[in-house]
Image (tube, helix red, strand yellow):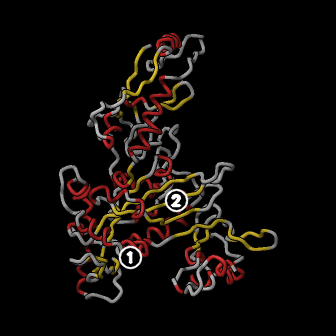
Amino acid sequence: MLATLFLPAGNRLPPSFYLMKQIMDVRDISSIEWHSCEAGCTGWEPTPKAEWHKHKDDCCPKCNGRRFKSVLGKDVPVRRFWFVAPEDSIKELFADPAFVKALLEARVVNVGSFADSEEFRRLNKAVGGVLSSSEHGIIELGFDFAQPYNFLQHSTGFMFMRYGSLPNGGSARREWHKLMLCIEGPMEPSVLDAFLQPVVRSLERLAPAQPPRAEQAEAAGDAATPEHGIMVTPAVRDSSGAIILGAAFLHFAVLGGIYADSPAAAALRYSIKSFTACFSCAFCKLVGTMCDGTVRFCGYIKPVLTPAGAGQGRSYQMGAQDGRLLSDLEQRAQATAAAFNRARGFEPPHGNRFKGFSPLLRLYWVRVSSLFVVPFSHAFHLGIFKGLISSMFAKESKQQDGTAAANPLRISNDARHADGEGNQGRRLHVQPPPPDVPAADAGSAARLDLRSV
């Protein structure tokens, strides 16, 4: 009805939304909808809704949580999540000639670029040197839980992927960020086993085979469907600017980093989330000290004895060359021990900084200490800078004996009062541009002037 009212006569648009989806080959959302138990231990692959009744009794083998629950007489999933295979997103990106051009230019080694870093050389060596070629790329993930609603608490998890080190800020282009994972709320899951299962499986396929086995793969010859990598047909522009299809080739995409704040990174790493825990740092052997009912890390100013775990019986201090940092082998050993205890219903060993073995650590090229990257803007504006401003304008607190608590950064009440009086006679003036400045440059020629009146 609406089509006949608003569309011109003789139009050739499909008469129904269903037919339009069929013509455009739009997949139904159920094809990427996975299910998990409430805790997130076990994931079930996409199942057509018409077959849900066959799986209504499915239970998690780890926590015995159910896959479905009954709501108003209907079986609905206990928890859903949507996984968009990165292989599909990569093929979509290679259909953009601007992206293909940026990827081919990404291997140019500039001073200060990631391709000039020690981590890139380690990563390239670990995957057999394939990253030296411009036909392959490094992908980065971003992960966090967010509150999409203003009127209720509904924590929803999101994971996006992008290609790193693209020139001219190409990695930051919004259209080249692709959704990979969406975890339904309202509460965050206890573990991420179910959700990382398809992610890690795809990342393993996209990367080259582990070098010791690469020779065997070459000896077997090129298969129609390679075990590792993805066949892509890039879109390029010819001399006239028209978009044409280039020659197909086998493309490798290697996970190079995950951008996440500290709580999200701890969830992915399966390490301790709480910053008030004595063994909260997953990267070094420093331990917290209980001070006035709060755990504080005094190792920044003096050596602190490590009572348990790695480095037991030794003292460590921030900045000292005393073997403070945990090696990748030590981190994996602690994660393995925690997973062993977890499978048997026990807490991790005392002094262990991990709660389990993250599926991400199954990736042979991954190094725990360099995989997770804290976004600078997040760490600065919501961490360091926010903490500084909070300390400067904090309320005066009293100790138990009635004296003021020490806070050298706090601006006293007297100083605030004096500064407020001094600003009462100030106004903001905009100095107009000179009369001979063209109108196009008038905005840049105008200046802000803070004057006392």
Q: Is residue 388 visible?
A: yes
| Category of crowding for the residue at label 1, using alpha-carbon neighbours closer than 10 angstroms: few (below 14), some (14–19), many (at least 20) | some
Name which of mark 2 and mark 1 comes first in the sequence: 1
Q: Nearer the viewer, mark 2 or mark 1?
A: 1
Q: Secondary structure at mark 2?
A: strand
Q: Residue at x 58, y 72 (%)?
A: 34
Label 1 belongs to which residue? 91
Tell whether 330 sits left or right of 22.
left
Amino acid type at mark 2:
Phe
Q: Residue at x 33, y 31 (%)?
A: 433
Amino acid type at mark 1:
Lys
Tell whether 274 sits left or right of 171.
right
* Label annotation for residue 202: none
Q: Secondary structure at mark 1?
A: helix
Give x and y (percent) for residue 140: 37, 60
- Report which quarter residue 300 is drawn in: top left
| Residue found farthest to the right | 72
Camera-side residue of 72 and 151: 151
Give x and y (percent) for residue 420: 51, 15
Q: Residue at x 29, y 81 (%)?
A: 244
Camera-side residue of 176 and 253: 176
Query: Residue 356, relative to residue 443: is it above or below?
Result: below
Give x and y (percent) for residue 78: 68, 66
C-beta proximity under 8 Å, tags 2 and 1: no
Q: Quadrant of the C terminus?
A: top left
Tell whether 424 sits left or right of 2.
left
Label 2 belongs to which residue? 158
Q: CA distance from mark 2 to mark 1?
A: 21 Å
Q: Quadrant of the N terminus?
A: bottom right
